Image: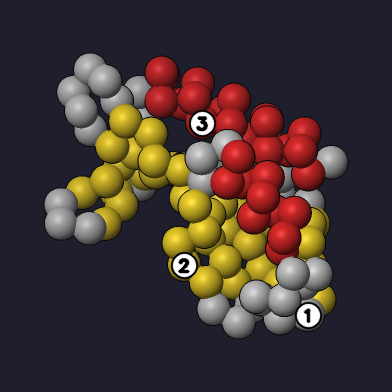
């Protein structure tokens, strides 16, 4: 599920600041290559122990990834349910408590990047 109106889409940040800000909120930069990086936040549903991942896609607009001053732009934000053995399913409904956590973390990230 794509999360619209986060206020993050199009925001830019230097890599070192984005890494620090995201890490403080529990995000991990899992996937990266020369011009893209993906930040994931794992959220567990205590009711049924299912796992969800809030994912933020970014793209380098100046410099190259792994240079601390590379400038990244947020492209999209989405959330999906983890599936066995390793995948995300984006079509199933997301429980409201999970969406509440995701929304709060996105707001906190937006504030730290502004």
Residue 12: image quadrant is bottom right
Residue 24 seen by the camera: yes
Asked if residue 57 lies left or right of residue 82, the reply is right
Numbered disc 1: secondary structure: loop
Kindly report which numbered mark, 3 or 1, lies closer to the viewer in this rendering.
1
Cα separation between marks 3 and 1: 30 Å
Q: Is residue 54 depicted above or below 16 in this figure?
A: above
Residue at point 50% right, 21% down?
A: 100
Q: Looking at the image, how many numbered discs can be counted on the residues?
A: 3
Vertical placement of residue 101 versus 80, above or below: above
Give the residue at mark 2: 31
Q: Position of residue 38 (x, y in %)?
A: 53, 61
For the C terminus, give its image quadrant.
top right
Looking at the figure, which quarter contains the N terminus? top left
Secondary structure of residue under mark 3: helix
Give me the residue at 41% from left, 25% from top. Answer: 98
Which circle marks residue 38 in the picture? none
Instruction: From the image, tell me which residue sits under label 3.
Output: 102
Q: How is the image coloured?
A: secondary structure
In the rendering, which numbered label is found on residue 63?
A: 1
Which comes sooner in the sequence, label 1 or label 2? 2
Q: Residue 10: where, in percent of width, then height?
A: 76, 54
* Real-space Cα separation, disc 1 to disc 2, in angstroms: 18 Å
User: At which x and y percent is residue 99?
Assistant: 46, 26
In this view, the residue farthest toward the right is 114
Which residue is at 39% across, 41% downward? Answer: 42
| Precedes in sequence: disc 3 or disc 1 | 1
For marks 3 and 2, the one nearer the N-term is 2
Q: For the residues labelled 3 and 2, say whether their Cβ atoms are less than 8 Å apart.
A: no
Secondary structure under tag 2 reads strand
Label 3 vs label 2, nearer the camera: 2
């Amino acid at each position: 599920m794509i999360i619209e109106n986060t206020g993050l889409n199009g925001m830019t940040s230097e890599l070192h600041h984005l890494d620090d800000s995201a890490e403080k909120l529990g995000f991990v930069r899992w996937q990266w290559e020369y011009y893209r990086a993906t930040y994931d936040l794992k959220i567990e549903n205590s009711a049924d122990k299912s796992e969800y991942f809030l994912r933020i896609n970014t793209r380098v607009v100046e410099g190259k990834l792994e240079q601390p001053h590379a400038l990244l732009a947020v492209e999209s934000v989405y959330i999906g349910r983890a599936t066995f053995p390793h995948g995300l399913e984006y079509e199933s409904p997301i429980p409201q408590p999970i969406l509440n956590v995701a929304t709060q973390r996105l707001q906190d990230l937006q504030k730290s990047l502004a």
